[in-house]
């Protein structure tokens, strides 16, 4: 065999460069998560274990009966005060992954419409522990790198749904039954719904890696590529994010109405709270004090279990934030799946709690 017939050999320099780029991204992610998530959650775990509480409900006064712009502003202020650090980190990581992580590397692990890619992305979501809105920029970044729909969804949904810190808080503050329900339905959403979503669209059957690399790689220096990536993300995501949070804050009294004693654990209440929880937006783990507050006011275990799944999974703002990155029918399928699994969760909660 002549030298011309030999297969091309991998370039050591390129391999080394990939390792440096991936290492730099992982280091930035680890430092950011340590500051924004891991250390604060360690302290919050101690609080949850000793006081059986992680704070008051972000919904505020549940006795209000009419929406108002003051309510919108009050909720937005409390909400953004809770999430601004994680939101900045989400945008930072979502833009950096587009310029630091090589497309070939991402496509190798996350580019297939297989359960393997979905499982890897879902597992990668466990340490980041973000809410659905803060994880949205990273999901957008993944899709810009042509990661498969199932993998991007698994990372996005897995962040809030199989967040280990939230599960620990839940065990201390609510009960082990609520924790098991959350874990089971969280796994179904993260891995099952995300994998099925791959089947709803026909992405490229035979992936041409070279063509995808040419399509996704930005041109220019590192700073120009990064600023371009971050600028386009901020221009679309931030305005829609702020406006939708304000609207939901104004209408939260309609989404979570006070119920009579007879209706507080009915099927209608479960459906109502499943839909409301799917639309509403909260910070990470805020569903726990919300449920705790509702239970103290007499809400049944069924609607509470529905909120346990639907409040963290997705929200109207997060769906808007990723709207350009996923086909509409995929997002409709995800939202419908969250509502349906929320109702099922509510029925399970009503039966066993």
Image (spheres, rainbow, N blue to C red):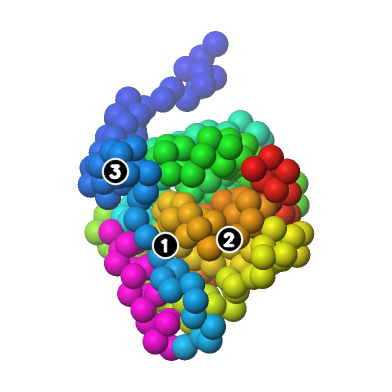
Please tell me whether mark 3 sits on a helix, a strand or a loop: helix
Q: Which residue is mark 3?
A: 47
Depth check, mark 2 against mark 1: the one in front is 2
Residue shown at 60% from the left, 72% from the top? 258
Asked if marks 1 and 3 touch (Cβ < 8 Å), the reply is: no
Q: Position of residue 242 (x, y in %)?
A: 41, 76
The label number, if any, that marks residue 298 in the structure image: 2
For disc 1, the neighbor class at 10 Å (few under 14, some 14 to 19, many from 20) is: some
Q: Which residues are magenta?
A: 69-85
The label number, if any, that marks residue 11 in the structure image: none
Q: Which residue is mark 1?
A: 57
Depth check, front residue: 176 or 232? 176
Residue shown at 42% from the left, 82% from the top? 71
Location of residue 227 by image quarter: bottom left
Q: Position of residue 189 (x, y in %)?
A: 63, 45
> How far apart are the alpha carbons under marks 2 and 1?
15 Å
- Mark closer to the chain start, 1 or 3: 3
- Mark closer to the chain start, 2 or 3: 3
> How far apart are the alpha carbons under marks 1 and 3?
16 Å
């Amino acid at each position: 065999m002549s030298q011309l017939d030999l297969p091309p050999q991998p370039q050591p320099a390129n391999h080394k460069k990939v390792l440096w780029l991936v290492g730099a991204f992982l280091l930035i992610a680890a430092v950011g998560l340590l500051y924004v998530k891991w250390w604060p959650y360690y302290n919050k775990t101690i609080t949850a274990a000793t006081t059986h509480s992680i704070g008051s409900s972000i919904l505020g006064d549940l006795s209000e009966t009419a929406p108002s712009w003051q309510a919108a502003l009050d909720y937005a202020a409390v909400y953004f005060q809770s999430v601004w650090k994680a939101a900045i980190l989400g945008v930072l990581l979502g833009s950096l992954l587009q310029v630091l992580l090589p497309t070939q590397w991402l496509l190798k692990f996350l580019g297939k419409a297989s359960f393997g890619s979905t499982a890897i992305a879902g597992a990668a979501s466990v340490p980041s522990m973000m809410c659905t809105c803060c994880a949205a920029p990273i999901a957008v970044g993944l899709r810009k790198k042509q990661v498969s729909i199932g993998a991007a969804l698994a990372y996005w949904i897995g962040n809030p749904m199989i967040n280990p810190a939230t599960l620990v808080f839940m065990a201390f503050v609510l009960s082990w039954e609520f924790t098991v329900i959350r874990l089971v339905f969280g796994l179904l959403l993260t891995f099952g719904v995300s994998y099925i979503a791959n089947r709803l669209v026909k992405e490229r059957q035979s992936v041409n890696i070279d063509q995808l690399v040419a399509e996704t790689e930005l041109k220019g220096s590192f700073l120009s590529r990064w600023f371009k990536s971050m600028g386009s993300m901020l221009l679309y995501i931030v305005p829609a994010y702020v406006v939708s949070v304000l609207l939901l804050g104004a209408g939260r009294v309609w989404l979570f109405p006070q119920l009579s004693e007879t209706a507080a654990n009915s099927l209608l209440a479960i459906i109502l709270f499943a839909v409301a929880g799917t639309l509403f937006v909260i910070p990470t783990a805020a569903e726990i004090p919300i449920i705790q507050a509702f239970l103290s006011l007499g809400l049944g275990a069924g609607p509470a279990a529905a909120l346990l799944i639907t409040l963290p999974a997705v929200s109207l703002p997060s769906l808007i934030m990723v709207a350009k990155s996923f086909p509409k029918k995929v997002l409709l399928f995800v939202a419908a799946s969250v509502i349906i699994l929320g109702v099922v969760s509510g029925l399970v909660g009503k039966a066993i709690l």
